[in-house]
Image (tube, rainbow, N blue to C red):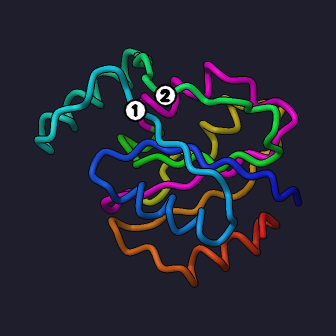
Amino acid sequence: MSKNILIVYYSHSGNTRKLAKLIAEETCGKLCELVPEKAYPDDYSTVVEQAKKEIQAGFKPELKTKVQDLAAYDTVLVGSPNWWSTIAPPVAAFMESYDLSGKNVVPFCTHGGGGSGHIEAIVKKLCPDSAVLSVLSVYDDTAKASQVEAWLKKTGVK
């Protein structure tokens, strides 16, 4: 598989950022953090309610982040916290704003007990002309380099 790897992610609490950084260390991929124009609240219960409403309404926030030269990458790893069994709205906004056709798209997520939920199926739906590889799901901030390396080898990214 290609070594032209982009790692795009959204992280609210820092767990997905930690996982994205481990993936970058293992792949030498370029990191790109998705930052919404309007930050989500810090308070857990407030962000949970807001996320639920946004997901139900299909809301996609405007992003400050602009991905440069997406065509240069053959493989795009896409990371999100598991919010209500799906990807966070900033990740959905990215996936709907950029054409990932013909690329290997590799989802990863962090969660508080919900596993990967429907994330892999959602990514397949949003990227019908991409090769969507198996999702990596990590509880909270427990990501380990050995776990990431095994997943990357299993998916053929590494």
Assign a secondary structure to mark 2: loop
Instruction: Give the magenta-colored segment's residue range.
Output: 88-114
Q: Position of residue 141 (x, y in %)?
A: 34, 68
Which amino acid type corresponds to the residue marked 1 in the rendered image?
Answer: Val
State left or right for residue 14 relative to residue 75.
left
Which image quadrant for residue 18?
Answer: bottom left
Residue 32 higher or lower than 28, as above or below: above
Which quadrant is home to the C terminus?
A: bottom right
Q: Which quadrant of the structure image shows residue 105? A: top right
Could you tell me residue 30's position as x and y percent?
Answer: 63, 51
Q: Residue 52 or 38: which is nearer the viewer?
A: 38
Label ID, residue 99: none
CA separation, marks 2 and 1?
6 Å
Q: Residue at x 64, y 38 (%)?
A: 123
Tag 1 or tag 2, which sits nearer the N-term? Answer: 1
On the picture, is 67 further left or further right than 63?
right
Q: Secondary structure at mark 1?
A: loop
**Residue tagged by mark 1?**
35
Q: On screen, 89 above or below 153?
A: above
Q: Give the tally of numbered discs.
A: 2
Tag 2 near tag 1, CB within 8 Å: yes
Does the magenta-highlighted stretch encompass residue 105?
A: yes
Residue nearest the viewer, comparing 105 with 29: 29
In the rendered image, which residue does mark 2 sit on? 65
